Amino acid sequence: MSPLHRLKLVPSSPWRTPWQADTLAGALLATCARTHGPQFLRDKLIEPMLAGQPPFVLSDALPGDLLPFPIHLRLHRYPDGTNLKAVKRARWLAPDDFSRARGGIPPPAEALLPDSAVFRDETRQHNTLSRLTDTSARDADDDSHSAIGIFQKADTLLLQSGEPKSLTLLFRFASPDAGNLLLDLLHELSLTGFGADISTGRGQFDLPSDPTPAPELDTPPANANAVVSLSTFQPGPHDPTSGYWDAFPKFGKLGPDHALENLQVFKNTLILFRPGAVFHTNRSSPFLGHAVNTESLFPPDVVRSLLARNLRIIHPAFGLMVPLQLGEPK
């Protein structure tokens, strides 16, 4: 794997889908299918990922220059009087505090940033339209059986000061060709947008500059004996198991290009780890995780339908890692 690189993404609209590494990688695979065709996608991306050799591995798109709060620091004994709820809610650190944390020095409590210090959610109300009348309301005595009502969706925006407000994508690639392919796919994705409701202008972003190296994150601290994840990911069967993490369920679904008539489009529930997960390891791993295969993602009837159409859907759940110094496992 190449040294670590960073790329700035500048949102030009709010978004409705979190910029998580696995979701972003999935969007890039769908973009690859659209621009290069299914055989290219299978040969260049799907098969290497299933073999545990991903052509590229991404971080989550991180807010500004901030980096994930390493989960093991929640167990640090902060001074009496520290707001422990603030420690529990911590999600982000400034680069200098993250660097010290990687070297085994816990950041002060006032340096811990929750999501609410970085993102703002704005809830918007929407009307459900009748498929019979194409109206958004009906009289109380209307005997239509269409479901009419009001529902809410949340838009997310950055709270950074200054302009332009940006997200940072960190990544490694297996070869120069893979790196060029990644940048081409990101450019193509920027033309359409990322995530839900791109047709109404959500998830739009620009790529104002070329990638730059991030050597400060690649350089291991003294006595490094662990790694910390910069991504939302799922450990693979051969990954380390001693560590600290924050797990959550993800209820994914098939993209719009693969909707299956009369079959559910939801994936099986996946348990993923948030950025900041820490694992003891004696080797400096550039990434952990794996690609979840079709058979593990869907019920048997959906798997049969997909394979009959020669479709192999994967969930790329790789995590970008940087070295960290951690005490011995207890």
Image: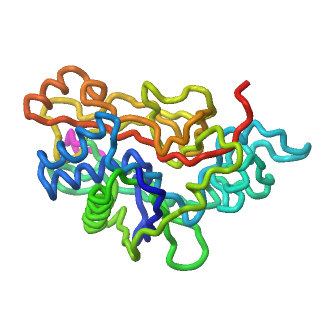
Relative image position of residue 182 (x, y in whole percent): 31, 58
Image-based side of 292 in relation to 307, left or right:
right
Closer to us: 134 or 272: 272
Name the image colouring.
rainbow
Q: Residue at x 54, y 29 (%)?
A: 240
Image-based side of 33 in relation to 153, left or right:
left
Quarter where residue 250 is shown = top left
> Residue lying furthest bottom in this view?
163
Relative image position of residue 281 (x, y in whole percent): 59, 33
Image quadrant in which the C terminus is located? top right
Q: Is residue 308 visible?
A: yes
Q: Residue at x 72, y 42 (%)?
A: 73
Q: Residue at x 23, y 31 (%)?
A: 264
> Residue lying furthest right in this view?
80
Q: Is 325 situated above or below 305?
A: below
Give the residues in magenta.
Answer: 140-146
Relative image position of residue 45 (x, y in whole percent): 25, 45
Magenta stretch secondary structure, dominant:
loop
Relative image position of residue 247 (x, y in whole percent): 54, 33
Quarter where residue 43 is shown = top left
Quarter where residue 176 is shown = bottom left
Image-based side of 306 in relation to 291, left or right:
left
Image-based side of 27 in relation to 98, left or right:
left
Residue 142 colored in magenta in the image: yes
Q: Is 163 situated above or below 189?
A: below
> Residue lying furthest top in this view?
300
Closer to us: 184 or 152: 184
Closer to us: 44 or 219: 219
Q: Residue at x 25, y 64 (%)?
A: 188
Residue 115 colored in magenta in the image: no
Q: Is residue 196 visible?
A: no
Q: How many marks?
A: 0
